[in-house]
Image: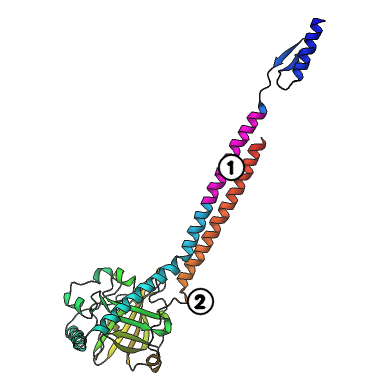
């Protein structure tokens, strides 16, 4: 009886959740097997896995935000850099105008006579015109040249305004890389832009810069179009007489022709290849009535999207495609990791 009671008591105890389980081995005896807290272990593992998933989600979210910001920066870069460059150009032009306005008439006359004398000396000499985009020959050590038409002391000679293609740019001494990143450069060994008989001023600018629009639309100028060279408070008008494409070393058409007052605009061509030079030749003319009536600068505000050069549109489209690709890549990567995590959890 005592044995039976003992067994009964053991049986009742085995049914308790806190008691060890009894297992019959080979039908002979019951072996008590402790119940390992498996449920508690599974809960801990699940908690760790959830923490890992949460961390992964946060990492992917951060990467997505970084990718989105990078893509937006890439898209907006051409517009922002061009806008900043325009503001800088406007500030330079405003400084030049302010300086000239504050000068006395006799000082302006003195500066003009100095420029005329420089052109006469150049005309009587035998200086050779060089390719403005050859960096080896863009800055001679001529101190006299540096002082001509430099009333603001910042290397600015004047302004080039081309209403047809929305250009309003400062004209700088020399054609160094630094100069051509921000405006138009005066080609050394050519007449300074003061005008007058037997002068030929050559002005150079880049095409296709990702940060600024200089001569991107110069190829749109044709015969009878006109532009303005503003210097020492005077507006000199020039009308296009011809255009041509030449090799860099072909500079014969840039020489001075007796009795003529000429300006030639130069840029590289074809776009992206730059093996040749586009020359736009123009001669002095009366200031057009439409300019006299408006007397306004054409580039003091950002141009509409439709007027952007093709290379800036290309950069923007490329930025959009890159951004979409990055976002899609992140989305697919997240889905892949979720599927992989779910499979591992089921196992």
Instruction: For mark 1, give the secondary structure.
Output: helix
Q: Residue at x 31, y 89 (%)?
A: 236
Q: What range of the chain is rendered magenta? A: 39-62
* 303 on left or right of 274: right
For numbered disc 2, what is the local secondary structure?
helix
Separation of marks 1 and 2 at Cα, in angstroms? 47 Å
- Which mark, residue 101? none
Name the residue beneath numbered marker 2: 306
Quadrant in which residue 302 is drawn: bottom left
Q: Quadrant of the C terminus?
A: top right
Q: Which residue is mark 1?
A: 53
Residue 257 position in % (x across, y down): 25, 89
Locate residue 171, reporting x and y percent.
Answer: 30, 78
Q: Front-most of 180 and 128?
A: 180
Expressed as whole percent of the image width and height from the top left, the position of residue 64 reads: 53, 53
Could you tell me residue 226's position as x and y percent?
38, 88
Asked whether residue 272 is in view, the answer is no
Q: Residue at x 30, y 71 (%)?
A: 179
Residue 100 vertical position relative to residue 7 in the rendered view, above or below: below
Residue 195 sits in quarter? bottom left
Residue at 47% over, 62% down: 74
Q: Is residue 49 visible?
A: yes
Instruction: Please tell me whether residue 47 is drawn above or below residue 74 in the rendered image.
Output: above
Nearest the eye: 336 or 275: 336
Name the image quarter holding residue 163. bottom left
């Amino acid at each position: 009886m005592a044995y039976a009671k003992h067994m009964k008591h053991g049986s009742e105890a085995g049914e308790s959740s806190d008691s060890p389980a009894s297992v019959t081995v080979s039908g002979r005896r019951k072996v008590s097997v402790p119940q390992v807290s498996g449920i508690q272990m599974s809960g801990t593992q699940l908690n760790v896995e959830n923490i890992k998933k949460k961390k992964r989600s946060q990492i992917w979210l951060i990467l997505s935000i970084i990718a989105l910001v990078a893509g937006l920066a890439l898209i907006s870069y051409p517009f922002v850099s061009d806008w900043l460059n325009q503001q800088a150009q406007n500030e330079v032009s405003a400084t030049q105008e302010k300086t000239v306005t504050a000068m006395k008439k006799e000082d302006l006359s003195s500066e003009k006579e100095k420029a005329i004398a420089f052109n006469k000396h150049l005309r009587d000499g035998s200086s050779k015109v060089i390719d403005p985009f050859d960096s080896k020959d863009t800055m001679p050590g001529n101190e006299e040249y540096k002082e001509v038409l430099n009333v603001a002391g910042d290397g600015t000679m004047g302004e080039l305004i081309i209403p047809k293609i929305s250009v309003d740019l400062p004209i700088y001494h020399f054609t160094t890389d630094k100069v051509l990143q921000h405006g138009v450069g005066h080609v050394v060994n050519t007449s300074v832009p003061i005008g007058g008989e037997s002068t030929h001023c050559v002005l150079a600018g880049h095409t296709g810069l990702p940060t600024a629009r200089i001569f991107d639309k110069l190829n749109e100028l044709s015969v009878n179009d006109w532009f303005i060279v503003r210097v020492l408070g005077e507006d000199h008008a020039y009308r296009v007489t011809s255009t041509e494409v030449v090799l860099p070393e072909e500079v014969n058409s840039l020489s001075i022709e007796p009795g003529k007052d000429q300006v030639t605009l130069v840029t590289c061509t074809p776009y992206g290849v730059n093996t040749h030079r586009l020359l736009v030749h123009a001669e002095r003319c009366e200031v057009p009535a439409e300019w006299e009536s408006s007397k306004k600068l054409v580039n003091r505000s950002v141009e509409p999207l439709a007027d952007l050069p093709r290379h800036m549109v290309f950069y923007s489209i490329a930025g959009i495609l890159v951004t979409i690709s990055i976002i899609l890549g992140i989305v697919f990567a997240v889905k892949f990791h979720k599927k992989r995590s779910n499979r591992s959890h089921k196992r």
